[in-house]
Image (cartoon, helix red, strand yellow):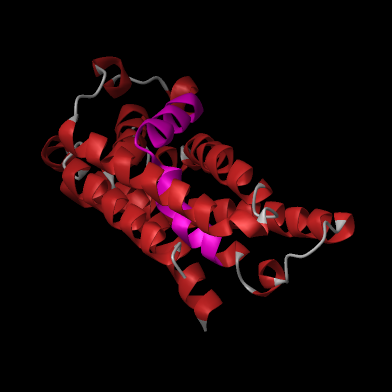
C-alpha cells in the first residue's frame, strides 16, 4: 500500500508538470498553429519528453546511488528535503524568466525542455517520493559490517527505481501536457496561451516547499 501511494504521487506530479505551461504545452500548441495541422501538436512529444526525462534522471540518479549509505539515510533525506525547501523559497521570491526561453524553434524543443525542467527544479519534487521508494524493503536491511554484494544490489535497485520513476513521471507529464495542448489548439485558441503562460509559478514554488517539508519530516523516522 505504501509503495502504491508513492507511485501514485509520481504520476500525480507528472500530471501536474504536464499541465504547467512552463513545461512546454504552449509550444506544442504553437507548433500545431504554425504548421496548421493537429498532428504537429503531438509531434512535439519526443523532444519535450526527452528533455524532461534527462532533467529528471540528472537529479534522481545521483541521489539513489547514495541510497546504500544506510547508516546516514536520515541525513541524506534531511539534506534532500532542505535542498527542495530552499529551492522552493527561491522560486517564490525570484520569479524572473529569460525572455529568450519564450521564443523557441522546433529544433530546440528538447534542449528547451531540459533547461526549463532543470531551472524550475522539477525533479526536486520527486526526491522525497524516490527516497521513500528506495527505503522500502531492500533498503531497510540491517547496516552492520560492509557487505559489498549487498551494497551493489542496493545501488542497482536504486538506479532502476530512479529510471523507472523518471519514465513514469515523464509519460504522465507528456500525456497531460499534450492533452491540454490539443484542447487549446482545437477549441480554445491563442487567447488561452496569453492567459496561462507561466501563471502557475507561485503554485509550483509552494509545491516545492511542501515537498521539502515532507522530506525533512520523514527524515526523522
Q: Residue furthest right?
A: 149
Q: Which residues are magenta?
A: 110-132
Residue closer to the observer: 149 or 113: 149
Q: Is residue 157 visible?
A: yes
Along the viewing direction, whichever of 104 and 115 lies nearer the viewer: 115
The total number of labels drawn is 0
State the predominant SS element of the stretch in magenta. helix
* Residue at (51, 69) in percent of width and height: 7
Percent coordinates x, y for residue 115 in the rendering: 43, 27
Tell me the quarter of the picture where residue 101 sits: top left
Image coords of residue 93 (percent x, y): 16, 34
Q: Position of residue 90 (x, y in %)?
A: 25, 34
The answer to whether residue 138 is left or right of residue 15 is right
Is-magenta flag for residue 116? yes
Answer above or below: position of 36 versus 220: above
Q: Residue furthest top?
A: 100
Amino acid at each position: 500500500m505504501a509503495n502504491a501511494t508513492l507511485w501514485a504521487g509520481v504520476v500525480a506530479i507528472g500530471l501536474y508538470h504536464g499541465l504547467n505551461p512552463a513545461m512546454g504545452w504552449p509550444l506544442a500548441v504553437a507548433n500545431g498553429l504554425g504548421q496548421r495541422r493537429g498532428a504537429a501538436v503531438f509531434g512535439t512529444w519526443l523532444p519535450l519528453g526527452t528533455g524532461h526525462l534527462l532533467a529528471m534522471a540528472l537529479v534522481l540518479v545521483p541521489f539513489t546511488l547514495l541510497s546504500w549509505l544506510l547508516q546516514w539515510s536520515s541525513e541524506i533525506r534531511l539534506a534532500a528535503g532542505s535542498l527542495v525547501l530552499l529551492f522552493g523559497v527561491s522560486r517564490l521570491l525570484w520569479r524572473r524568466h529569460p525572455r529568450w526561453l519564450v521564443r523557441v524553434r522546433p529544433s530546440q524543443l528538447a534542449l528547451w525542455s531540459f533547461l526549463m525542467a532543470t531551472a524550475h527544479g522539477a525533479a526536486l519534487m520527486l526526491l522525497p517520493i524516490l527516497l521513500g521508494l528506495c527505503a522500502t524493503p531492500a533498503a531497510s536491511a540491517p547496516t552492520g559490517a560492509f557487505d559489498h554484494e549487498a551494497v551493489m544490489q542496493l545501488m542497482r535497485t536504486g538506479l532502476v527505481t530512479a529510471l523507472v520513476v523518471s519514465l513514469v513521471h515523464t509519460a504522465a507529464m507528456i500525456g497531460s501536457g499534450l492533452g491540454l495542448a490539443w484542447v487549446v489548439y482545437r477549441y480554445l485558441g491563442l487567447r488561452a496561451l496569453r492567459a496561462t503562460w507561466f501563471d502557475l509559478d507561485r503554485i509550483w514554488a509552494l509545491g516545492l516547499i511542501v515537498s521539502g517539508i515532507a522530506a525533512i519530516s520523514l527524515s526523522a523516522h
